[in-house]
Amino acid sequence: MERHQVGLYLAAIVAGAAAGWLAPAAAGALERAIAPVLGLLLYATFLGIPFAALGGAARDLRFLATLLVLNFAVVPVVVFGLTRFLAGDRALLVGALLVLLTPCVDYVVVFTGLAGGAADRLLAASPILMLAQMLLLPAYLWLFAGAEVAAAIDPGPFVAALLGLIVLPLVLAALTQLLARRAQTGAGARAVAATLQALMVPLMMATLAVVVGSQIVGVGRGPASLLAVVPVYVAFLLVMVPAGLLAARTARLDVPSTRALVFGGATRNSLVVLPLALALPEPLAAAALAVVTQTLVELVGMVALVRIVPRLAPAAPSARPA
């Protein structure tokens, strides 16, 4: 399954889209399944990260500084330029700004690991990324969309995502690793860890399927103007991949950190900002559909980048397997 994971992920996206479109009544149940399925996927991912390495990852100030500059200095400039094409539709503009200005802190760790990147560094940086976007998003929205939109931002979804999708799976994974090292309970914990590690590909497929299946009808039945955001999201990916590579080269990062930086700059926090978009006033209702559309575009892009990024940032010859 690992050898064919990209094809399997694309199949999961297609299957989720077909299921959501053919059974629109299931959208609510699929949406409620996103958080537990994603939490289980992250728990399985965190089990594969040695927690002793997280301390060193947190002290990698060069990577952290580059990641922050990329997301909160470079990305806003890119987003401002790209979203000028949406300036005529305020709702779509707000939705695009909400999602593109917020770096991902959840499944980006999984995609980074699949591409051979330094997932531990992104995991260590997640709380800082979350705090920074909570503080800076209102300021950027005030600059790009006006004070009314900035005032509507509620930090609640950010806090809930940090606790439910990062802290809780992280604590459970740490406890599992601790139990696995003990003689009496170690066998059972090691069996759980091994099972979940073997289920990584199916868990990612399930996550992709439920996310796409829960949102496809809303996007498909949205206004025709929604198509205008698709080129913006594709262009964002096309710009941020080379921007991440350039930033990594400038900071002289190693190959795993370079791959992590590319994913950290290109992947957005759509699942977290969607509740923010849904809470906006009625005249901005289409903002939620703009956020969902970004999720669909991004998932396809991330599946492709799992194969593309290792080629753009190849391992040194001595580091490659024989």
Image (cartoon, rainbow, N blue to C red):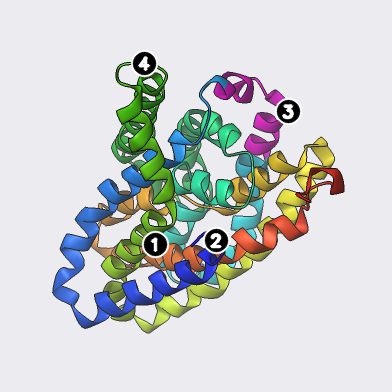
Disc 3 to disc 4, C-alpha distance: 39 Å
Label at residue 94: none
- Which sits earlier in the primary sequence, circle 1 or circle 4? 4
**In the image, residue 6 lies in the stretch drawn in magenta:** no
Task: Please indicate, yes or no, whether residue 274 appears anywhere in the rendered image.
Answer: yes
Q: Secondary structure at mark 4?
A: loop
Disc 1 to disc 2, C-alpha distance: 13 Å
Snapshot quadrant of residue 119: top right
**The disc labelled 1 sits on which kind of residue?**
Met
Q: Are the two marked residues, 1 and 3, in contact with CB atoms closer than 8 angstroms?
A: no
Task: Please indicate, yes or no, whether residue 42 appears anywhere in the rendered image.
Answer: no
- Which sits earlier in the primary sequence, circle 1 or circle 3? 3
Disc 1 versus disc 3: nearer the observer: 1
Relative image position of residue 241 (x, y in whole percent)? 69, 57
Looking at the image, residue 308 lies above or below residue 149: below
The residue at which mark 3 appears reads as 62
